[in-house]
Amino acid sequence: MKIFCVGRNYAEHAKELLNDVPTEPVIFMKPQTALLTDHKAFYYPNFSTDIHYECELVLRICKNGKAISEKFASSYYDAITLGIDFTARDLQQKQKEKGLPWEIAKAFDMSAVLGTWKTITNEEKKSSFQFQLYKNNQQVQHGDTKDLLFSFEKIIAYVSQYFTLNMGDIIYTGTPKGVGPVAIGDKLHANLFDEELLRFEVK
Ligand code: ZN
């Protein structure tokens, strides 16, 4: 099972981190050991003092494929949820300055939080999705997939040029603006429209 993530997929978020708005998707991966499911607590790691939440809509791949064309890409996912792409921003900044890979800042244990899956119909795939992240009951992020720089179909087509997609792989589709730090004791929850799909605590 593979975990793909798209970086800088909302223009306003790319700008808040002073990155250029990309002309091609920015793809990175996390290992399976990064997964944190079932609303379990996230334990703040001792190698960072600046862990940031990034709330993202996540796709679940439902069949195998490679070099998938954009036209058929929507049939390759069957469920969505909300997740957090936890990022050690201090480590990421250091790695970026040196031009080094991001893995230690992005792919560490428990850095890929996943909410409850929701199967979606072909009809629902045609609309856009709105989601919110709350920290201690205060809304900190709001996203609408109509603002994606690269649509779900474009991401699937792009990723599958390089990596065979397998049933069960998942794709984090990027975070809107409003990323920020978490602290021990914070309670996070995320809603898709008005439905809560994710709730957990930082310990
Ligand atoms: Zn992200």
Image (spheres, rainbow, N blue to C red):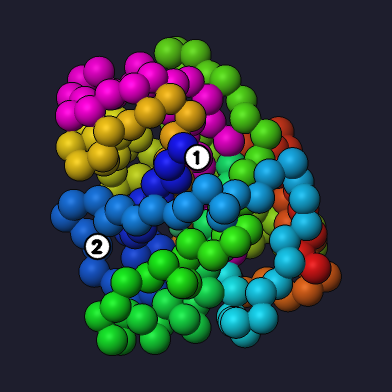
Q: Is residue 73 magenta?
A: yes
- Dividing the image into four quarters, tell me where ligand 1 lies: bottom left
* Camera-nearest residue between 38 and 179: 38
Residue 140, percent across and down? 63, 62
Residue 65 in view:
yes
Name the one closer to the observer, 176 or 119: 119
Q: Residue at x 60, y 49 (%)?
A: 35
Q: CA distance from mark 1 to mark 2?
A: 21 Å
- Look at the numbered disc 2 and give the secondary structure of its residue: loop
Q: Quadrant of the C terminus?
A: bottom right
Residue 128: give x, y in percent of width and height.
44, 31
Mark number displayed over residue 58: 1
**Of callouts 1 and 2, the N-terminal one:** 2
Q: Residue at x 49, y 13 (%)?
A: 121
Under mark 1, the amino acid is: Val
Q: Label 2 CB, ligand 1: below 8 Å? A: no
Residue 152: x %, y % from top left: 35, 34
Q: Which residues are magenta?
A: 53-81
**Residue 72 position by quadrant:** top left
Q: Which residue is mark 2?
A: 21
Horizontal side, residue 57 vs residue 7: left or right:
right
Circle count: 2
- Which residue sits at x=38%, y=19%? 63
